[in-house]
Image (cartoon, coloured by chain):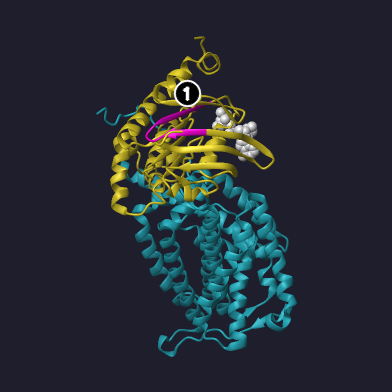
Amino acid sequence: MTADDFLTVTDLHAGYGEARVLHGVNLSVGRGEICAILGPNGAGKTTLLRALSGMVRVRGAVRLDGADLTRRPPDAVARRGVAHVPEGRGTFMPLTVEENLRLGAFVRRGRGEVEADLERIYGYFPVLRERLRQPAGSLSGGEQQMLAIGRALMLRPRLLLLDEPSLGLAPMVTRELFRIVQTINEQERTTVVVVEQNAHLALDVAGRAHVLETGRIVLSGSAEQIRADEQVAQSYLGYRV
Amino acid sequence: MSGPTEVTDKPAPAAAPARGGVLARVTGAGWRRPAVAVLLVLACYAPFQLVPFRVFQLTMVLVYAVALLGLNLLVGHAGQISLGHGAFMAVGAYGAAIMLDRWDVPHLVTLPVAAGLAFVLGLGLGLPAVRLRGLYLALVTLAIAIFLVPLLKRFESVTGGSMGLTLPKPAPPAWTGLAEDQWLYFLALAVTVAAFLLAHGLLRSRVGRALHAVRDNETAAEVMGVRLPFYKRLAFAWSAMFAGAAGCVYTWVIGFVSPDSFAVTLSITLLAGLVVGGLGSFAGPLLGGLFVMFVPSISQDINDAAPGVIFGLLIIVVMYVAPTGLAGLAGRLARSTKRILRKE
Ligand SMILES: Nc1ncnc2c1ncn2[C@@H]1O[C@H](COP(=O)(O)OP(=O)(O)OP(=O)(O)O)[C@@H](O)[C@H]1O
Ligand SMILES: [Mg+2]
């Protein structure tokens, strides 16, 4: 653990009622870093993100920039600058694109800033500007994912949690999306934790990566180290080193 | 600097399946204002052209519309369900009745008190409700409605028991030159307009945006910092408040309250009326008010057992033909008319 750890997770346990999913996760993410979480289906990746943003009961500790976030309700976590793009995008289907984006700034005050941020988001995703008054449910899958990320950025997050942004998207679109995430990370110094099935892409943009299996971190390292790991290569990258 | 990059993706499908709320909003942009103005003029003109009984019926349509505004907030905008909305109407009606009966409180004072009482009860009953969803929530709210009638009958000394309470109606001031039915009508109209303005102000505010978020995706709303329990409870309280106000005006208009006027069927009729009128739409509560007022009484004329049958059939037909209710249907017609006109 270094002095510049932005997010630290210590011995985190979480689950749903009787079903225990996370069994003592330890993790630290540096300030301004992109961190990838890899792992098979059902490993608890989504649950980990939900635990970070206060949506499931946890035991253990979550600290963000020195502040204790453990067992805080989701709105308190959001107020602390954690934006979560949930699995499946969480589009407000009948609302317009613009209304979706504005809801992203729900916990923020200050109208002028919100207007400026809308412009910033259109800068990243020009297609959203063209679709402003359209019901978000009429967007394509890729556009909805852009909307979900744009909406999360409206919070001006210090920490951005992305749950499988590639789900259901064409490889081309996914690649572009990751490039934008990288741009956001560079330009706004937003720390990113991304859960991803597409390990190739995730490892391309991430500095560090962790492998989660049945509720435990079984491997951590730099993206290069993880990529070079034989076990990972077989399970997640589809080739032998 | 790499700069923002544009992501190309396949174009979106042209039309989106949307709820009544969106349909009404999309179509309402241009013609809603003039339509409301015309409607208001007609509404002020009508009581001078109709016989007292018709004026009374229109007054009741307004009373139900106010109650449905509340139910629309809860069901159409916040995505919750209530089979007990009639109970909050009863709270307002009995609240006003008891104030009039016991303490001779002026009529106008009973309105804010009755509404406030219902609001507070809504907050209280909203507490267990926020933990429940769907069928469970439907059952709990239904239980409230079922529980109410025997409760009202039980405390006879205050509520008048099954006999109910008879009360003075507000008298028209001499300067208006209005007959009693006309005066009651205008009182109800004023409350309706105020209620519409309030509901719309609410929906355009931060609270309204939060309610829509809760309705459309609880998980996403939550991670965006919308406190689910708080806003669900608030939706219950607001919706109860409108029902309470409607109940109070009901007491003014009828001059009589009895437990059987607020039986479970009223709650179910209200929900059916709203669904038929158009959930989450602007005109839904008004159209629903017409439904609640006229459908049961017209079908009663056919046969004693007819109301249930006709209700069921109407709901099924509306759901098939116009899943966004009559308001959505009207919006669709308006838009296709506009399209045809533009082509010429
Ligand atoms: N709401 C829930 N209630 C009960 N159990 C749940 C719930 N959500 C997830 N689980 C269980 O928790 C375990 C981990 O689920 P989770 O969604 O965190 O996995 P994941 O790593 O995100 O998987 P995937 O890659 O398929 O998204 C699974 O066994 C799942 O069945
Ligand atoms: Mg998952």
| Disc 1 element | strand
* Amino acid marked by disc 1: Gly
B204 displayed left or right of B220: left
A36 falls in the magenta region: yes
Q: Position of residue B235 (x, y in %)?
A: 53, 59
Q: Which residues are magenta?
A: A27-38
**Which corner quadrant of the image does residue B130 belong to?**
bottom right
- Residue extending farthest left: B1
Residue assigned mark 1: A221
Q: Position of residue B195 (x, y in %)?
A: 46, 68
Q: Is residue A188 above or below residue B72?
A: above
In the rendered structure, the residue with mark 1 lies on which chain? A
Please name the predominant secondary structure of the magenta segment in the image.
Answer: strand
Q: Position of residue B197 (x, y in %)?
A: 42, 65
Q: Which chain is yellow?
A: A
Q: Which chain is cyan?
A: B
- At 52% from the left edge and 9% from the top edge, which residue is drawn? A240
Q: What is the crowding at mark 1: few (fewer than 14 residues within 10 Å), some, or many (at least 20)?
A: some
B170 or A149: which is nearer to us? A149
- At 46% from the left edge and 49% from the top edge, which residue is drawn? B225
Query: Within 8 Å of ligand 1, the CB of disc 1?
Result: no
B107 or B311: which is nearer to us? B107
Residue B141 visible here: yes
- Residue extending farthest top: A240
**Quarter of the image where ligand 1 sits:** top right
A199 falls in the magenta region: no
Q: Is residue A87 above or below residue B62?
A: above
Q: Is residue B323 above or below residue A218?
A: below
Residue B329 visible here: no
**Which corner quadrant of the image does residue B240 belong to?**
bottom right
- Residue extending farthest bottom: B174
